[in-house]
Amino acid sequence: MRPASTIYSLPVLLGLLACGFVAKGQAGAEPEPALAASVAAAQQQYDASFTAHPQLYNGVEYADYSRRYHARTGHQFFLSAERQQGSAFYNEHHFLNLPLSYDLVLDQLVLQQNSNSLLLRMVSEKVRYFDIGSHHFVRLVADTTKGNVLRTGFYEVLQQGRVQVLAQRAKRLQEQLKDRNTDVVFIPADRLFARKDGVYYAVRSKGAVKRLFADKAKEVQAYMQTNNLRLSKAQFESTLVELTRYYNTLGT
């Protein structure tokens, strides 16, 4: 009969590791880097073991509503219609190497099961943050008592610091009737926000950018001219991020 395997929780596993190193330390201390490497390996193994945990697959099925249209221009997902490698902090656990999609029409994170092609809607309230490629998203909850300009949902973090820049990635669905058939076009509808001194602001115009950096207006304006930065429609997001990065290096 095959012996049953034992699964330890992360605190117990790390505790056993620490005890082992203490015991070794009595005969001859092992260097701290070795302990750090072992703890990191334990963390990685623990996280990886959760990729097949039942609680990861407890959402309802995701139905690809775009398939009901005769013809489609674009798609509803972030970056690509194909599943992408990502990770998520979900239900108080960090899951790595997940096949994810992010539906920008529904503001819905979608997970593909490893064993088949079934797509599941991850429960948004259980998602603290997730990553797709190099893009990091956090879930924010609107404070209606303060007239918050943010809606509850996922936001991509574009810049951190004294001023934080966030993007609400979104698409809107536009139906078109052609020859008795209904086609669909997916149109990007991103919105940018900034958080400064604990307050969120919508950033939609050059004026909003100037107000955001009003306390360092001369420095920011000079930086724009020196680096040939423009707040044109095509460059608005990248320029805002670069100006924020520069602003955050300035003293108060």
Image (cartoon, rainbow, N blue to C red):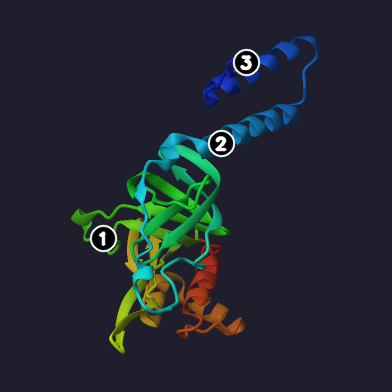
Kindly report the distance in space between the C-alpha atoms of the residues bearing marks 2 and 1.
35 Å
Q: Quadrant of the N terminus?
A: top right
At which x and y percent is residue 159? 50, 62
Kindly report the distance in space between the C-alpha atoms of the residues bearing marks 3 and 2.
25 Å
Tell me the crowding category of disc 3: few under 14, some 14 to 19, or many 20 or more residues within 10 angstroms, Cα based.
few
Mark 3 or mark 2, whichever is nearer to me: 3
The answer to which quarter of the image holds residue 168 is: bottom left
Disc 2: which residue? 47
Judging depth in this view, the residue of 82 and 92 nearest the camera is 82
* Outermost residue toward the left in this view: 145
Disc 1: which residue? 148
At which x and y percent is residue 45? 62, 33
Decide which of tag 2 and tag 1 comes sooner along the chain.
2
Going 21% across and 61% down the picture, which residue do you hit? Answer: 147
Going 55% across and 82% down the picture, which residue do you hit? Answer: 229
Mark 3 or mark 1, whichever is nearer to me: 3
